[in-house]
Amino acid sequence: MDSLLDFLRQGGYAFFVWGAFGVTFLLMIAETVQLRRSHRTILSRVGRLVRLRGSQNAPTAPTHTASTPKTPAKS
Amino acid sequence: MKMNWFKFASPTAFYPIAGRLVPWLAGAALILILFSLYWGFFETPERLGGSNPQKEYYRIIFIHVPAAWMSMWLYLVLAGWAAIGLVFNTRLSFMMANAVAPTGAIFTFIALWTGAFWGRPSWGTYWDWDPRLTSELILFFLYIGYIALHSAIDDTRRADRAAALLAIVGLVMLPIIFWSINCPDPNQCAALHQRSSMSKVESNILLAMLTMTLGFWLYSFATTFSRLRGIILTREADSTWVRDVVAREAAV
């Protein structure tokens, strides 16, 4: 128990050590969570968009094709 | 062997690859970061003596230096993709540059933040307008500027090109940041920030620092690819393959 407290105390520099490490990993976790959420949001938004276009163009089926990248001819 | 280097330059081809890579990259990053934290806190000396004595707070080095390296490296990656996008006009390059920017900005912020928390106990101040600190702060503003400029222009293609130019002009900061502490004649640069002297670092400290760097690096790959997938879906929303992907992933 004492050794754990000693570890947390970091020789009296707990505020600086944990303040630095804490904010770092908080930001990294926040970024990860935000990315997961935004992927779901984007999926549902694009899904709505696709359904909307699908219903608008119902008689003439949409002829969008997977676009190919503009790649230059490699010499 | 002749390879088609442009094969994966297609968002269609890259989207599923990125999706498969992200969990592995994130898992490997987590393992490396945890190892580095263990090694950094339990296998290193408590205090450092020598010409630059440091107490427990020196442990901030395990995130400060890797984050600072990542902040510069990711800017190079960002500007590199921006330049490739401008030259070859490949869509994925601009998307890649876009996807890197937020992660780079976060690491730059982390470098500044941890630097302040290290500066206070060792220099007696959180902030000083020292060349290294100031140039790193400008790098942070460049990342923010890139993101802001891109989001301020509605037309994606114009936004890509304008932001790419800004990123390339901003490259001028990288040598400034580097030379701000590594200048040839130390007497000519009055810097508060320590010079980098990797050869003098104790081997356990170096191990923890390099593992963390590798962990941050893989983490950056994971977040960039993950963000890239979102950007690809948004920008290619008109194409049939996106419709199939959305249908498939929504069903999961």
Image (cartoon, rainbow, N blue to C red):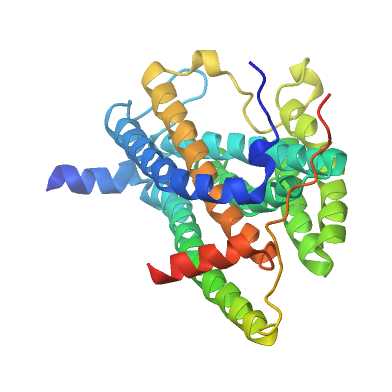
Residue B46, percent from left and from top? 32, 30
Q: Is residue B130 visible?
A: no
Which residue is at the far top?
B199
Vertical position of residue B169 compared to residue A64: above or below:
above
Tag count: 0
Residue B186, percent from left and from top? 74, 18
Vertical position of residue B44 compared to residue B96: above or below:
above
Residue at 76%, 40% (x, y): give it: B79
Which residue is at the far left?
A1
Residue nearest the viewer, comparing B202 with B174: B174
State which quarter of the image contains the N terminus of chain B.
Answer: top right
Q: Is residue B203 visible?
A: yes
Vertical position of residue B183 compared to residue B193: above or below:
above
Residue at 66%, 67% (x, y): give it: B237
Residue B176, percent from left and from top? 79, 32
In this rendering, would B201 be left or right of B136? left
Identify the image quadrant of residue B111.
top right
Identify the image quadrant of residue B70.
top right
Residue nearest the viewer, comparing B99 with B53: B99
State which quarter of the image contains the C terminus of chain B.
Answer: bottom left
Residue A41, percent from left and from top? 53, 73
Residue nearest the viewer, comparing B191 with B60: B60
Vertical position of residue B200 compared to residue B53: above or below:
above
Residue at 60%, 60% (x, y): give it: B241
Residue at 64%, 24% (x, y): give it: B195
